Image (cartoon, rainbow, N blue to C red):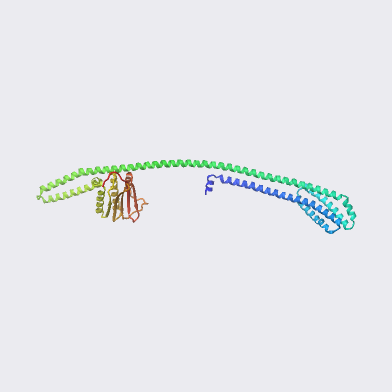
């Protein structure tokens, strides 16, 4: 895979590598074949030298056998003579085949053959005279010195042929050296070219890598910038959500105070006026008294509704009774209103007033969602503190939901998440279809203790 990546990066890498490989193989193989051919030629030259030397030795052997036969007259001395004749013929056949394409050497072999045949003819004449009993005649031929002159001529001609072969061997050796030198130079040049190509490729690759690193640096810088921007925007959204929630809570508080002060005063005044009217009428007008009783009952209902609305807008119990008591009241009213069993495990915790309000709203939002969507029969509310952290959870045994899917309406919990994070807390929602749901939040403790 890495090789394929390198080839894809540079389209010239593979063709250049193939060209270099073919060139090196071509030079190596051509040098090898030429060297083998020259070595074969040197081998044949050595065989030719051996044949020339064997030819000379065979002539000497033939003459020696002839002399032994003439001196002893015994036929067994003719055995070397007969064997030498055969070897001489074999040597000439080999030399003729070896020099078939060399005119100068053919002339030298032809002269050597004539000299050799003349010498062998002389030997054959002396042997035949000996066989015929003409011993004196054969001795006269030997003593004439003619045979020695022919033998010397054969040695001279053989020496010339050997010198010719020595020159050929020397030239062949020079050719082999030249071939090896050319091969070395070619391979050295190709190696140098390959190193140069490798250097250029590595430099180009380094340049591309630097370019990629620069692009990666730019991309990373842009990513960091975007992350900073997203973080800043998230902080701004969190601050905005906190500001909106704070403004809403302030508006709720103001509205609750107005309802308590103005509407409460009006309803109380109306109730007192109705009570005075009822006491003055007495039994004079029973129908009016009945209507006044109905009016007082309606005023009491309005006052109770006013109180409930005020508590929903701004729980006064939170400021006067503390978080634990306020949550108990909220749980009891929810249980009565929704006919759901609510189990509370609430322990005093240390939180500032804004954080207590966030916890109250979280529990309120959770039980509202349970009454609307969960179809639960039981609810568990828990408040505890441990290791400097306050944890609050609301769990139900309802239908549950898939947390991986975005619900149709989850803005209440999304807003609550921002409010929890604004108080440096963490909100987690855990649920499985058919397994109920749990809303769990953790906030840091503060120095103020509210029970």
Q: What x and y, as percent, mark residue 215?
A: 47, 41
Residue 213 percent coordinates (x, y): 48, 42
Please tell me which residue is depicted at 86% across the width and 50% down the height of the picture. 146
Residue farthest to the front, as pictured: 72
Q: Is residue 143 above or below residue 231?
A: below
Left or right? Give the position of 93 relative to 185: right
Q: Would you say residue 249 is visible in this rendering?
A: yes
Can the viewer see residue 103 in this picture? no
Nearest the eye: 99 or 66? 66
Q: Residue at x 74, y 50 (%)?
A: 46
| Residue 431 x/y as whole percent | 34, 53
| Residue closest to the far bottom | 75
**x and y percent of residue 255 in the render?**
24, 43
- Left or right for 216, reference 255: right
| Horizontal side, residue 302 vs residue 74: left or right | left
421 with respect to 163 (left or right):
left
Q: Which of the 4 quarters of the picture holds residue 265?
A: top left
- Count of labels shown? 0
In depth, the one of 368 and 441 nearer the eye is 441
Camera-side residue of 180 and 71? 71
Question: In the image, what residue occupies the spot 52% across and 41% down?
Answer: 206
Task: Name the image quarter holding residue 200.
Answer: top right
Considering every residue shown, the one lying at the far left of the view is 284
């Amino acid at each position: 895979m890495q090789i394929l990546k390198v080839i894809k990066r540079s389209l010239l890498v593979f063709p250049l590598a193939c060209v270099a490989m073919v060139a090196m193989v071509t030079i190596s193989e051509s040098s090898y074949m030429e060297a083998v051919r020259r070595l074969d030629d040197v081998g044949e030259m050595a065989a030719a030298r051996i044949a020339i030397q064997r030819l000379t030795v065979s002539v000497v052997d033939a003459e020696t056998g002839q002399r032994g036969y003439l001196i002893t007259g015994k036929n067994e001395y003719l055995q070397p003579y007969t064997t030498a004749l055969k070897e001489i013929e074999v040597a000439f056949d080999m030399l003729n085949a070896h020099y078939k394409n060399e005119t100068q050497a053919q002339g030298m072999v032809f002269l050597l053959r004539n000299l050799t045949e003349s010498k062998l003819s002389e030997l054959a004449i002396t042997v035949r005279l000996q066989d015929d009993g003409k011993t004196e005649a054969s001795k006269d031929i030997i003593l004439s010195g003619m045979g020695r002159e022919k033998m010397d001529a054969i040695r001279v001609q053989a020496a010339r042929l050997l010198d010719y072969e020595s020159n050929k061997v020397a030239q062949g050796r020079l050719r082999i050296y030249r071939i090896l030198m050319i091969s070395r130079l070619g391979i050295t040049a190709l190696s140098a070219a390959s190193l140069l190509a490798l250097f250029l490729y590595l430099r180009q690759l380094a340049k591309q890598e630097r370019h990629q690193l620069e692009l990666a640096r730019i991309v990373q810088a842009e990513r960091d910038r975007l992350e900073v921007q997203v973080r800043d925007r998230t902080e701004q959204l969190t601050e905005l959500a906190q500001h909106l929630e704070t403004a809403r809570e302030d508006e709720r508080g103001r509205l609750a105070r107005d309802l308590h002060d103005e509407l409460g005063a009006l309803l109380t005044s109306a109730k007192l006026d109705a009570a005075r009217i009822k006491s003055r009428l007495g039994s004079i007008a029973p129908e009016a008294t009945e209507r006044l009783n109905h009016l007082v009952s309606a005023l009491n209902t309005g006052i109770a509704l006013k109180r409930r609305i005020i508590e929903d807008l701004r729980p006064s119990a939170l400021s006067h009774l503390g978080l634990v008591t306020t949550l108990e009241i909220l749980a009891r009213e929810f249980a009565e209103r929704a006919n759901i069993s609510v189990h509370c495990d609430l322990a005093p915790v240390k939180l500032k007033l804004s954080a207590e309000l966030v916890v109250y709203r979280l529990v309120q939002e959770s039980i509202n969602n349970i009454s609307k969507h969960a179809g639960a029969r039981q609810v568990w509310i828990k408040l505890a503190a441990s290791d400097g952290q306050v944890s609050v959870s609301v769990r139900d045994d309802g239908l549950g939901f898939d947390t991986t899917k975005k619900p149709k309406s989850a803005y209440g919990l999304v807003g609550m998440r921002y409010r929890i994070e604004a108080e440096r807390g963490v909100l987690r929602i855990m649920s499985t279809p058919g397994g109920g749901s749990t809303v769990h939040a953790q906030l840091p403790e503060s120095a103020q203790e509210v029970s």
